[in-house]
Image (cartoon, helix red, strand yellow):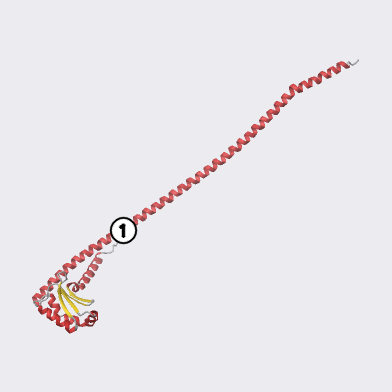
C-alpha cells in the first residue's frame, strides 16, 4: 500500500489550520471570558470583603455609640439623683431653719409678753407700794416721802461720805433733786447734813416732775438715789423670782 504524502501533508496542514483557528477564535475568547469572570469574581469578593469590613466597623461604631449612650444616660440619671438629693437636703435644711426661727420668734414673743406682764405688774406694784407708803407717811408722820428720806439722809450718807468726797474732786457743788419742791424745813435739814458730812460742798436744790418720787443727790461724778425705783428693786427681783418659780411649777413632766 502506497502513502500519498501530498494528501498526508494536506491533512496535517488542514489540522494545523484547524487548531490555529480553534485557538484563535474559540479557545482564546473562552479563556479570556474565564479570566474576565475570575477577575470579576475576585473584584466582587474584594468588594464583599470591603463591605464586610465596613459593616463590622459600622457595627463596632454602633456598639460604641450605644455603650456611650448608656454611659451618658447613667451619668444623667446619677446627676439627676444627686441634684434631687441636694434639693431635698436644701429643702429639709430650709424647713429646719424656718422651724427653728419660728421657735425662736415664739420664744421671743413669749419673753416679750412675760416682760410686758412683769413690767405691768411691777408698775402696778410700785404704784400700790407708793400709795401705801404715802398713806402710811401721811397717817403716821404727816409728811411726804422726800421729807422722810431727808430726815434719815445723814445716816445714809455717813457710810459713803468719803467716796462722795473723792468723787467730787475739784467740784464744790452738790445737787439734790426731788420730784416736788422740798419744804424749807426739809431743805435746811438736808443742807446741814451735807455741810456736816461734806465740808466745802455747796448744796443746790432742783425739782424734776419726771423723776420717780424720792431724793437723788449728785456730787461731782457720783450719784446716790433714794427713790421709789431704788426701793422697788428688791421688790422687782423678788417678783421675778416668784414668777419664774411659778412658771416652772406649772410645767409638769408627762408620764404614763
Q: Is residue 223 above or below residue 76?
A: below
Q: Is residue 151 above or below residue 119?
A: below
In depth, the one of 243 and 173 nearer the eye is: 173
Q: Position of residue 247 (x, y in %)?
A: 24, 65
Q: Is residue 135 above or below residue 88?
A: below
The residue tagged 1 is 101
Q: Is residue 229 above or below residue 84?
A: below
Q: Position of residue 147 (x, y in %)?
A: 12, 77
**Residue shown at the point (56%, 39%) measured from the top left:** 59
**Residue shown at the point (70%, 27%) measured from the top left:** 34
In depth, the one of 83 and 242 nearer the eye is: 83
Residue 25, quarter of the rendered image: top right
Q: Position of residue 129 (x, y in %)?
A: 15, 71
* Secondary structure of the residue carrying numbered label 1: helix
Residue 99, quarter of the rendered image: bottom left
In depth, the one of 131 and 243 nearer the eye is: 131
Relative to 153, 85 lies left or right:
right
Q: Quadrant of the N terminus?
A: top right
Relative to 5, 119 lies left or right:
left
Residue count near mark 1 (Cα–Cα under 10 Å), binned few <14, some 14–19, many ≥20: few
Please tell me how many numbered marks the rendered image carries: 1
Relative to 92, 9 lies left or right:
right
Q: Quadrant of the C terminus?
A: bottom left
**Residue shown at the point (39%, 52%) measured from the top left:** 88
Q: Position of residue 139 (x, y in %)?
A: 8, 75
Amino acid at each position: 500500500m502506497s502513502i500519498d504524502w501530498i494528501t498526508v501533508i494536506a491533512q496535517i496542514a488542514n489540522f494545523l489550520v484547524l487548531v490555529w483557528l480553534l485557538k484563535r477564535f474559540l479557545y482564546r475568547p473562552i479563556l479570556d471570558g474565564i479570566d474576565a469572570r475570575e477577575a470579576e469574581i475576585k473584584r466582587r469578593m474584594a468588594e464583599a470583603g470591603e463591605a464586610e469590613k465596613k459593616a463590622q466597623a459600622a457595627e463596632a461604631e454602633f456598639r460604641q455609640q450605644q455603650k456611650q449612650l448608656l454611659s451618658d444616660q447613667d451619668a444623667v440619671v446619677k446627676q439627676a439623683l444627686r441634684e434631687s438629693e441636694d434639693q431635698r437636703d436644701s429643702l429639709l435644711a430650709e424647713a429646719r431653719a424656718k422651724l427653728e426661727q419660728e421657735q425662736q420668734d415664739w420664744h421671743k414673743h413669749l419673753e416679750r409678753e412675760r416682760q410686758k406682764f412683769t413690767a405691768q405688774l411691777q408698775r402696778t406694784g410700785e404704784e400700790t407700794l407708793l400709795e401705801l407708803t404715802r398713806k402710811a407717811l401721811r397717817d403716821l408722820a404727816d409728811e411726804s416721802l422726800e421729807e422722810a428720806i431727808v430726815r434719815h439722809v445723814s445716816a445714809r450718807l455717813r457710810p459713803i461720805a468719803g467716796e462722795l468726797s473723792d468723787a467730787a474732786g475739784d467740784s464744790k457743788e452738790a445737787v439734790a433733786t426731788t420730784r416736788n419742791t422740798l419744804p424749807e424745813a426739809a431743805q435746811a435739814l438736808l443742807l446741814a447734813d451735807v455741810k456736816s458730812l461734806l465740808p466745802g460742798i455747796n448744796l443746790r436744790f432742783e425739782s424734776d416732775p419726771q423723776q420717780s418720787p424720792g431724793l437723788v443727790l449728785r456730787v461731782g461724778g457720783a450719784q446716790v438715789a433714794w427713790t421709789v425705783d431704788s426701793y422697788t428693786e428688791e421688790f422687782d427681783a423678788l417678783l421675778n423670782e416668784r414668777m419664774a418659780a411659778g412658771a416652772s411649777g406649772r410645767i409638769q413632766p408627762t408620764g404614763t
